[in-house]
Image: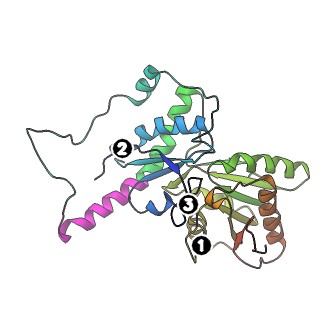
């Protein structure tokens, strides 16, 4: 109960059928469990996010568990060079942990086992406030980390070439690196496209996305997970955040079960978005690279 543990999660495919490759359907269904969820693009970010996770979760105005998520095999079984800070540098950045409650054999207690209706609603409210506080904590901790280690993660999201973009695509995880290359290639062809890297699923960066969406003609959301009959979890959150804005919000499902998402897939996403800028799209949800499904 409000214990700021850090639990890295290697995102894998859930049954049935089970798979050991990357999919986000394992962690995203836990969105309402009170966990902060962060997604990583590469192994350097995995290391850095785990370090920051402790400082975010342990703040007295947060005190929430944190789930740094990394794509199975693409990151978990791939070797790449990283800049690893020393233990002393990390200890100086984190400072000593000051726990609110400890296991004390001289003062035994049971926590979180049972509560009557007279108290539970207030506990739910406190957790809600803590998750809202986490937004400010994340922005402050990422700035502190940048000053200490020279790597800036820009808070809840990272914008790439969004300033004058006509359309933008929001991505999560390792696909972001591929999408960034596609943006550069399309820009060279004169197409004004941008990219939003969603670093956090909880707390969700609704305000940041809305600010970008107010200046574009269409926005797409890439999901590597599916809420059956509705769409991708990130799409659902984004559409909710943009309620009331008059612009197309489209969902692109790809890479489920660990299937590769290649440049051509992302180019197709931008092609659909650019078309939606000019005319009303035929649908909201697009299954990219799916056999037997027509785009």
Comparing 242 with 260, the one in front is: 260
Residue 2 placed where, x, y %? Answer: 30, 51
Q: Residue at x 62, y 53 (%)?
A: 172
Q: Secondary structure at mark 1?
A: loop
What segment is highlighted magenta in the picture? 114-132
Badge 2 crowding class, 10 Å Cα cut-off, few under 14, some 14 to 19, many 20 or more, is some
Q: Residue at x 56, y 74 (%)?
A: 228
Q: Residue at x 79, y 71 (%)?
A: 276
Task: Compare marks 1 and 2 and give the one earlier in the sequence.
Answer: 2
- The mark found on residue 206 in the picture is 3
Q: As displayed, is residue 137 above or below residue 14?
A: above
Q: Nearer the viewer, mark 3 or mark 2?
A: 2
Magenta stretch: residue 121 in it?
A: yes
The coloring applied to the image is rainbow
Marks 3 & 2, CB-CB < 8 Å contact: no
**In whole angstroms, how far apart are the C-alphas of marks 3 and 2?**
25 Å
**In whole angstroms, how far apart are the C-alphas of marks 1 and 2?**
34 Å
For disc 2, the marked residue is 5
**In whole angstroms, how far apart are the C-alphas of marks 3 and 1?**
11 Å
The image quadrant that residue 117 belongs to is: bottom left
For disc 1, the marked residue is 243
């Amino acid at each position: 109960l409000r214990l700021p543990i850090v639990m890295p999660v290697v995102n894998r495919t859930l049954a049935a059928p089970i798979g050991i490759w990357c999919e986000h359907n394992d962690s995203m269904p836990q969105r309402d469990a009170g966990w902060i969820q962060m997604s990583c693009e590469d192994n350097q970010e995995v290391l850095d996010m785990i370090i920051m996770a402790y400082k975010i979760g342990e703040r007295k105005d947060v005190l929430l568990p944190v789930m740094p998520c990394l794509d199975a095999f693409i990151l978990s079984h791939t070797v790449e060079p990283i800049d690893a800070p020393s233990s002393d540098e990390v200890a100086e950045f984190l400072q000593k942990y000051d726990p609110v409650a400890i296991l004390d054999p001289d003062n035994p207690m049971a926590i979180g086992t049972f509560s009557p209706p007279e108290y539970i609603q207030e506990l739910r409210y406190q957790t809600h406030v803590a998750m809202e506080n986490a937004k400010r904590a994340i922005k402050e901790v990422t700035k502190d980390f940048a000053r200490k280690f020279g790597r800036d993660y820009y808070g809840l999201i990272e914008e790439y070439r969004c300033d004058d973009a006509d359309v933008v695509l929001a991505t999560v995880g390792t696909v972001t690196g591929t999408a960034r290359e596609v943006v550069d290639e399309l820009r060279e062809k004169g197409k004004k496209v941008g990219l939003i890297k969603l670093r956090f699923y909880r707390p969700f960066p609704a305000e940041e996305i809305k600010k970008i969406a107010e200046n574009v003609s269409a926005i797409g959301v890439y999901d590597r997970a599916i809420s059956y009959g509705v769409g991708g979890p990130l799409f659902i959150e984004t559409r909710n955040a943009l309620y009331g804005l008059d612009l197309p919000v489209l969902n692109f499902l790809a890479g489920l079960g660990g299937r590769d998402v290649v440049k051509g897939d992302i180019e197709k996403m931008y092609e659909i978005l650019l078309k939606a800028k000019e005319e009303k799209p035929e649908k909201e949800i697009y299954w990219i690279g799916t056999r037997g499904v027509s785009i």
